[in-house]
Image (cartoon, rainbow, N blue to C red):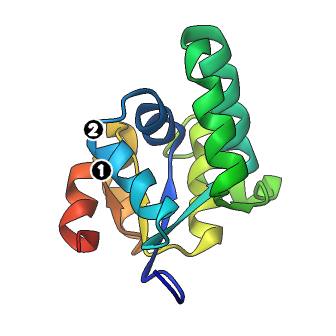
Amino acid sequence: MAGKPDHRIFIDSNVLISGIYSPTGTPARILYLHATGQVRIVVSQLILTETVLTLKKKKPDALPALNALLTSSPPEIVKNPSMDKVIKWTEYLHFEDAAIFAAAISAEPDYFVTGEKHFLDNANLKKTGLNILTPSQVMKYIEF
């Protein structure tokens, strides 16, 4: 597909890990849409680090698939947010999750896709206007 992807999707590490490890699930479909240029995946440096550490520890056989994604269809990588932006969200989230949320806010994506309930069910986070969705929910907006 030529041209600019229609949607920028900030994905949490759980979505990235699931998409890499299980090629038949909805997260894998999102990664496929990214690889074919239909959407643009956005991650922070923290998410990449968390993904690598988790795969090394729990699913090392999936590391080649992560490497293939990063070399053939690299996601947009945004910088980790400043400490003051992270601290702003620690009122509602644990520190690491606050860093992920602050990065998602700073990236200004169309959607923040996660499987984590502490993001999905938090009314204070929804007040930001950021579209926080599960992989299945976002597919309703991006499926072609």
Residue 9 versus residue 69 in the image, above or below: below
Residue tagged 2: 25
Question: Front-most of 123 and 133?
Answer: 133
Q: Which residue corresponds to the image point at 58% horizontal and 33% vertical from the top-left?
A: 65
The answer to whether the residues at label 1 and label 2 have Cβ atoms under 8 Å apart is: yes
SS label for mark 1 = helix
Check the image and report above or below for 104 versus 69.
Answer: below
Of residues 102 and 30, which is closer to you in this image? Answer: 30
Image-based side of 9 in relation to 105, left or right: left
Q: Quadrant of residue 46?
A: top right
Q: Is residue 114 above or below residue 62?
A: below
Amino acid type shown at disc 2: Gly
Q: Position of residue 139 (x, y in %)?
A: 24, 61
In-image side of 109 versus 83 (left or right)? left
Q: Is residue 141 visible?
A: yes
Give me the C-alpha separation between circle 1 and circle 2.
Answer: 9 Å
Residue with the mark numbered 1:
135
* Viewer-nearest of discs 1 and 2: 2
> Residue at position x 46%, y 35% from top?
14
Specify the amino acid type for callout 1.
Pro
In the rendered view of the protein, which quadrant contains the N terminus?
Answer: bottom left
Q: Would you call the spot at circle 1 few (<14 residues within 10 Å), some (14-19), or many (20 or more)? A: many
- Identify the residue at image location x=60%, y=48%: 100
Give the percent coordinates (x, y) of residue 142.
28, 71
* Residue 117 screen position, x and y as percent: 32, 38
Q: Position of residue 129 (x, y in %)?
A: 39, 75
Q: Secondary structure at mark 2?
A: loop
